[in-house]
């Protein structure tokens, strides 16, 4: 470290500040130190740094190990969180865990990480309770039923549903369906996004005097095809369907086609908490309420590091909207033409 300081023309203390991230330094000084480290072949020893500072500058992103697929939104969250952590001088590791408190306790008890970000949050989530009991700095991407003492960032599913209904109601639709993934009996039973979306849909349609039917199905084309039949059986007059189950979208369209109901001429379809890119993979291209995946990852890291650094002035809460992208799958209701 002494050689690095001499090469950069700074004090040993300044080199330590840059290496450990324990004190802010100017960008020119930081650049001079890092260039000197590169020229001298200096490699920062994470273990030694942790012993000296009692900080590893590593944060873990917890993801359920028993979830068998990763959505595009989850990947966007991973990438943006890792990028932002690196920009702020931290390493972010993806840590697959089970859903039991012991899995979380094993991670944090060894002081391998300074803090934790939790993903795929259920309304009643034992991981959240365990982190709170262990007094570990954490932020969740998602909300439990009780958010009073929960530091979180999440999509605003209630607003997303309302905005989606605004779009479809503005096209003359009055009889709605919602297709969500059937999570009963699986590792994501009580999954926050699904629970909140379904609840908001039923409340919003009832408040507006609109018809509202819900179908739950497997995240497959076969499941989507069955959901189309279920929705039409519940209300043959349905003209608009919102979905939180992209993997079943093709089957949903196919099921309506088989019943002589074509998209968007007879039925409009709007995908919630999705993305324009995913919607474009379906024919006709889906109108979507685009999820703020990159913003969720970035903001979660910033919130957690503010807690670690002691700069957070209050418990962080943030709800981010999904933004409407109109494509080919939504159009005027048949009676409105």
Image: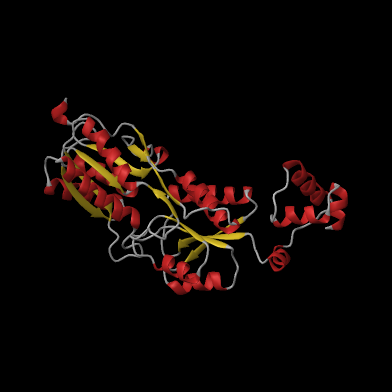
Q: Quadrant of residue 127?
A: bottom left
In screen coordinates, is 16 left or right of 155? right
- Classify 191 as above or below 214: below
Q: Is residue 41 visible?
A: yes
Q: Work out which quarter of the rendered image holds the C terminus and state it.
A: top left
Residue at horizontal 25%, vertical 41%? 253
Give how far across and how far down residue 34 sits, in percent. Answer: 77, 48
Q: Work out which quarter of the rendered image holds the N terminus and state it.
A: bottom right
Residue at horizontal 53%, vertical 55%? 304
Give how far across and how far down residue 239 sits, in percent. Answer: 18, 37
Name the residue at the front extreme: 313
Give how far across and how far down residue 156 sits, in percent. Answer: 36, 46
Q: Nearer the viewer, residue 250 or 81?
A: 81
Residue at horizontal 18%, vertical 31%? 172
Give how far across and how far down residue 312 sits, in percent. Answer: 54, 53
In screen coordinates, is 169 left or right of 74? left
In screen coordinates, is 320 left or right of 106? left
In screen coordinates, is 74 left or right of 333? right
Q: Nearer the viewer, residue 53 or 184?
A: 53
């Amino acid at each position: 470290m002494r050689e690095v300081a001499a090469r950069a023309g700074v004090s040993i203390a300044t080199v330590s500040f840059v290496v450990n991230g324990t004190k802010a330094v100017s960008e020119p000084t930081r650049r001079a130190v890092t260039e000197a480290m590169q020229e001298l072949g200096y490699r920062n020893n994470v273990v030694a740094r942790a012993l000296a500072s009692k900080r590893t500058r590593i944060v873990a992103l917890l993801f359920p190990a028993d979830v068998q697929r990763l959505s595009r939104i989850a990947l966007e969250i991973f990438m943006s969180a890792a990028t932002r952590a690196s920009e702020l001088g931290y390493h972010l590791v993806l840590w697959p865990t089970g859903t039991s408190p012991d899995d979380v306790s094993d991670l944090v008890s060894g002081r391998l990480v300074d803090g934790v970000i939790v993903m795929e949050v259920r309304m009643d989530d034992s991981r959240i309770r365990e982190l709170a009991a262990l007094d570990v700095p954490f932020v969740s991407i998602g909300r439990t039923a009780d958010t009073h003492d929960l530091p979180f960032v999440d999509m605003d599913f209630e607003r997303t549903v309302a905005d989606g209904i605004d779009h479809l109601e503005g096209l003359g639709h009055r009889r709605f369906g919602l297709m969500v993934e059937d999570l009963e009996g699986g590792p994501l039973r009580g999954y926050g996004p699904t629970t909140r979306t379904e609840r908001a849909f039923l409340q919003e349609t009832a408040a507006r005097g609109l018809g509202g039917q819900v179908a739950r199905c497997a995240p497959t084309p076969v499941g989507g095809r069955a959901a189309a039949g279920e929705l039409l059986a519940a209300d043959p007059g349905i003209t608009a369907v919102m979905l939180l189950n992209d993997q079943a979208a093709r089957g949903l369209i196919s099921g309506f086609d088989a019943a002589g109901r074509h998209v968007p001429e007879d039925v409009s379809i709007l995908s919630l908490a999705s993305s324009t890119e995913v919607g474009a993979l379906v024919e006709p291209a889906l109108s979507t309420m685009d999820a703020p995946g990159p913003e969720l990852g970035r903001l979660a890291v910033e919130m957690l590091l503010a807690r670690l650094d002691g700069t957070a002035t209050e418990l962080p809460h943030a709800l981010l909207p999904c933004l409407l992208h109109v494509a080919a799958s939504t159009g005027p209701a048949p009676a409105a033409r």
